[in-house]
Image: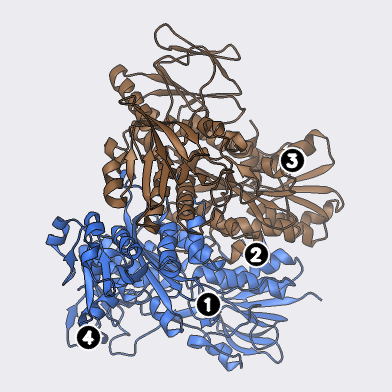
Chain colours: A blue, B brown
Amino acid sequence: MFMKVVIIGAVAGGTSAAAKVRRNDENVEIKIFDMDYDISYSGCGLPYYIGEEIGNRDELTPRNAEFFKKKYNVDVFRRHEVLKINSEDKVLTIKNLDTNNVFNEKYDKLVIASGARSIILNIPGVEKSNVFYLRNVKQADKIKEYIMKNKPKSVVIVGTGFIGLEMTENLKNIGIKVTLVERFNQVTPGLDEDMAVYVEKYLKSKDINMILGDSVVRLKGEEIVNQVVLQSGKTIDTDFVVMSIGVKPNTELAKEAGIELGINGSIKVNKKMMTNIKDVYACGDCAESYSIITGKPLYRPLGSTANKMGRIAGDQLSGGNLEFRGILGTGIFKIFDMTVAQTGITEREAISEGYEPVICHNIKTDKPEYYHGKEMIIKAIADKNTGKLLGVQIVGYTGVDKRIDVFITAITFGAKVEDLFHLDLAYAPPFSTTKDPVMYTGMILDNAINRGRKLITPDELNKLIENKSDVTIIDARVNKQYEEVHVNNAINIPHDQIREKADELNKEKIIVTYCNKGVTGNAAQNILINKGFKKVYNISGGHKNYKAQTK
Amino acid sequence: MFMKVVIIGAVAGGTSAAAKVRRNDENVEIKIFDMDYDISYSGCGLPYYIGEEIGNRDELTPRNAEFFKKKYNVDVFRRHEVLKINSEDKVLTIKNLDTNNVFNEKYDKLVIASGARSIILNIPGVEKSNVFYLRNVKQADKIKEYIMKNKPKSVVIVGTGFIGLEMTENLKNIGIKVTLVERFNQVTPGLDEDMAVYVEKYLKSKDINMILGDSVVRLKGEEIVNQVVLQSGKTIDTDFVVMSIGVKPNTELAKEAGIELGINGSIKVNKKMMTNIKDVYACGDCAESYSIITGKPLYRPLGSTANKMGRIAGDQLSGGNLEFRGILGTGIFKIFDMTVAQTGITEREAISEGYEPVICHNIKTDKPEYYHGKEMIIKAIADKNTGKLLGVQIVGYTGVDKRIDVFITAITFGAKVEDLFHLDLAYAPPFSTTKDPVMYTGMILDNAINRGRKLITPDELNKLIENKSDVTIIDARVNKQYEEVHVNNAINIPHDQIREKADELNKEKIIVTYCNKGVTGNAAQNILINKGFKKVYNISGGHKNYKAQTK
């Protein structure tokens, strides 16, 4: 008798698992059951379907059940809900949602790829018909239909993660006024606050309303919601509401079957994607991942990770040896012309994990200015003790996706900050600067960690100032720039005068240098250190970053 | 007494060395001598200056002598030719080209960054005033001036390396008809021939004349050249000529001083950028590099490498410990909307270096098709014995620069093909596909090397056919596609029929499968292998690549 594999869920993880099993073995019987009507869809494309970037709905669901039968000899049963997993007898109880027929299905190996669903706030009004979520194609259809029918002029989007912001762009692009509500004091809470300010500033320039540090407590309206009430008492009139405050894994079924759960209620799996129960695997948005950096469990459901996990589960249960190597917690999104990307851990997380993080903010253009280069700011976090990169966040316009992928690759291979300078990256003016921003980031951190060129973040400097520490702040820019605006209490010694004027300064005092973005500040710092000054710090990201951090 | 560093050459290598010395040490005396008037210019920007992408000449030379004095306390002497290096007495003989004054200059440490110059063919007519080269700003000025004054309608560009092709784009863009002459049988001789065909086809579509496998033997014309005569006897009428057949290092001075030369006549240096003579360093386009892949010497002069070498030389001679880690031989250029990039070694080089290369051609879009993704073809070369990536060539339109940089980073850290799938690269529809093309490339090669899913290149298949080998070729596409065009002697078994029809095939014979780009061909291959077939190969890059290779 041939082995029979049953898979619960036919989106990214489940279909990847099925395809991999078939690639490895012609003889296995493979069945997939999914509650939904749409299968194997691109969840990440949904905001663009609503924003009409994607014209044809079929582009979101390129693969139907027939495709899986023909190509992989896999039977996909849509609109079938698995009611129970009996792992002792290896049998599932399944209900056909169209006929209400309930039947049993035996398996030899089971893959749970039941995905995740939107978190629903427990507040009055959430049940109203113009309160939307965006997890699957049906929900996207509903939003689209509502917009077409009712031509709404305004929306409140709750939550400023990447789905919330992608929806912001797409709804704004079709002429709807957007108000964002975020319970944290910053947008995109996955970023460190000092990077989120750049996103916030940009959103403001795009005429997006933002209410930060406030929560939705009530959705008011008779038939439909027409007002959102916040914790602070503030109210916002709106034509509809999009909730994007995160997702939670669909693991109730697994839990009832005695399968061990982990972080955020996701299914605990080992590197072979095996659960604690024999012959039961899990993958995709319902499964726990772990961080390459810390080695600790991490729940960061994404289509790309689901695909990986599915392929690994499929390989393992059909005799292969692929193992999951964890994730960096990478994320990227576009919001209008801006790209926001991150990988690894944040400064916040680095501190709470007990690292001694060294931080740099590197402001550089992605290409030469003469070739339309645009500025990006790279925040990189390295471990002082090992010199290894721990995480990177980038906010910019063009070329951000390239730099994050290079950082990701470097971090995956355990790169130390000094390795980045040596990369023989591809240079020509249409693509990069002679030294790529990635290389510069490495040089700055190498100088800070290994060569005594320490950096000070705007936040750290403000704390020094607040504590009335005895610190000399040197603005190394030309006088005109200094006159315009400068750090409080800073004195102006333009870089080309520092050589002569250094002798007037106290070598034992803390000195902070800065320029616009950091390069000339570092040059001034070099001169002072080479002249015997002991405690010289350069402002990370220069005055440009300092100013951005001062609300 | 303070140390005195003298540097010959003030472009990328020399100025990088100077800046690094100063960053390390305030007290060193630093002097740079350069024959040229323009210093520290962006050589790579020159084609775009001619094509008017760069409007302002100053953007090419953002840093003048005053800048180096002010910022780095470095004295730059332009229009000064070093006539002789006396390394015994540590003294240079230098001529001021403006005054003809000749003087001696002592040094404690010397850096030779004398660059490279265009190779000039030894044929009649090369001395004419409308025969141009493109190495420095002055030459670019001359071309620009000639174009403005004479409004030429046609140009012959000799050589199809990246300068030749960048000039092609830029001259075509200002309305000049371009004919390319290349002595090899392919364009961009740095690429493998099977990748060059994609560039060639694109150039044809852009109405660029190409004459391949032919050499220029004479430039005819009375006062100026108006006809180019080729080895074959062919003649081309033209209004001017651009020669871009490569560069050679400026190392006569070094050679006379007893400094050891290496590959292509470049200066031999160790990882500290030291020459064989004490206290004499070399860096930039005059210095020898070496390959990270083979460990062997390599001469591949580029601005990015010159910058690296300069920084390392400067660090070493001022007490630092930076060491050069070699290059991958990375190159990238844009030609109209196409991007061509490569890194590491080619298939050709892999064979001649004694590797047993495994080749894949991976045709994928850089983004989902619903998000305007465009196809690129990635040729990757891996070592069968170690599973390590040896080199990559990519031809495509958007996102090519990102993929090559990810490959570069992976190769630098010694990536094996199976590592690529595990990368947690940044995915969202505006930036990538769920599995990035880089990951797919790794999966294809992993399958070929470690999982018995062997590939056959179009070239290898054609040899099998020519040798009348007993091979069954299966076109796994739908019948309609097969009917349109297929590989000679191929039979049509659409993928969804292979399961049933497999039994009709001989399991011991060589079988070659293919589809359009490779994915379904691989699926067919999987089925046959899983059904016990022993020798099944999938065409690398599918019929699309096969067709491209058939001229």
Q: Which residue was labeled with disc 2?
A: A69
Query: Tag 2: Cα neighbours inside 10 Å, few (<14), some, or many (≥20)?
Result: some
Q: CA distance from mark 4 to mark 3?
A: 69 Å
Residue B354 vertical placement versus A126 (above, below): above
Query: Could you say which disc has been placed on residue A291 in the image?
Result: 1
- Say which chain tag 2 marks: A
Query: Tag 4: Cα neighbours inside 10 Å, few (<14), some, or many (≥20)?
Result: some
Q: Position of residue B323 (x, y in %)?
A: 54, 55
Q: Which residue was labeled with disc 4?
A: A230
The three-letter code of the residue at mark 4 reads Leu
Q: Position of residue A380 (x, y in %)?
A: 41, 68
- Say which chain tag 1 marks: A
Q: Are marks 2 and 4 on the same chain?
A: yes
Tell me, yes or no, whether the two marked residues, 2 and 4, touch with CB atoms within 8 Å.
no
Q: CA distance from mark 3 to mark 2?
A: 33 Å
The N terminus of chain A lies in quadrant: bottom right
**Between marks 1 and 2 in the image, the one whose residue lies nearer the viewer:** 1
